[in-house]
Amino acid sequence: MDPGSVEKAAAALLDAYATGAPIAPLTEEHPGLTVPDAYAIQLAQVAAWTADGARIKGHKVGLTSAAMRRQFGVDQPDFGHLTDGMFYAEAAPIDVGRFLQPRIEPEVTFVLGRPLSGPGVTVADAVAAVDFVLPALEIIDSRIADWRITLADTIADNASSGGVVLGARPVRMDGLDLALTGCLLHRNGDLVDTGAGGAVLGSPVNALVWLANALGERGVGLEAGHVVLPGSVTAAVPVAPGDTFTAAFGGIGTVTASFGEAAC
């Protein structure tokens, strides 16, 4: 894809954010859209955000569970960028109108205590770089109409990022087996799904390793203090105005995200 087409595609996605109107899949307009093309489109949006003052606070890994890959018909993980404007506090209702087609995902989240750069990152390297973990609820969203995404579509759309709510109690990884960490996801008090860390590439740590090496191939490293969302332990659940979600993780704690009505 030539640079002009990359900028045009990025502009269409940025316009979807601004107008709240999703667009047709990019792969329909560009049938030959490749994964490298899609990451170029993602980075063009990131450049626009940072030019407007946004700060990169971390990354997310998407499509790490078999359930999510089946749900969206894709066959490998991807990554996206997290900016400072994507983080929401537990205590404040989230305006659901800020999103187009929001869904919720429970995740065990890493906060790094030291830089981590690939390629060649091992599980031991990744564990040593983690300061602590937190329970999190990621809000995924799509600027692609009706979630009709291929892998290239979701990569171009910043890995379908929307926002994230982090729990407030940090937990050290000592003694935790994240592969065996279970999760109960409730919506408005009703249990809607269950999962475990093993659904995330066998362990959320494996997703961190994958991310560090995938970024390293592009000359990018993870920084101390960065937040890494490694992927959902359940399938994504649609969000409606007025919903309250709580994820409870064994040995890690709980996190709650409450959604208000859409602002006029």
Image (cartoon, rainbow, N blue to C red):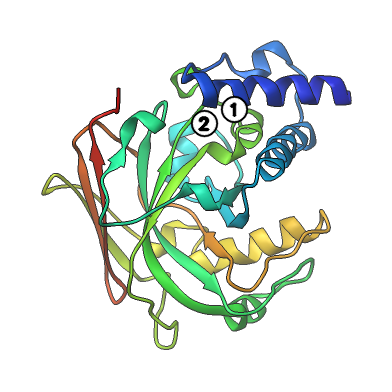
With 193 as the anchor, is 210 left or right in this view? right
Whether residue 6 sits left or right of residue 137 in the image: it is right
Question: For the residue marked with disc 1, what is the amino acid?
Answer: Thr
Q: Can residue 257 be seen in this view?
A: yes
Pick whichever of labels 2 and 1 is earlier in the sequence: 2
Q: Is residue 146 above or below residue 165?
A: above
Please name the residue shown 78% across and 61% down the image.
216
> How many numbered marks, from 0 up?
2
**Do we see residue 1 in this rendering?**
no
Residue sticking out furthest to the left: 189
Spot occupied by residue 177 in the image (x, y as percentages of width and height): 41, 78
Mark 2 and mark 1: span between their CA atoms? 7 Å
Helix, strand or loop for disc 2 = loop
In the picture, the disc for residue 183 is none
Whether residue 190 sits left or right of residue 204 in the image: it is left
Q: Name the residue beneath numbered marker 2.
A: 73
**Hey, which quadrant is residue 180 in on the image?**
bottom left
The residue that label 1 is drawn on is 150
Depicted 18 relative to depicted 76: above or below: above
Q: Quadrant of the N terminus?
A: top right
Residue 84 in the image: above or below residue 11: below
State the residue in front, 244 or 203: 244
- Quadrant location of the C terminus in the rendered image: top left
User: Which residue sits at x=55%, y=15%?
Assistant: 23
Q: What residue type is labelled 2?
A: Gly
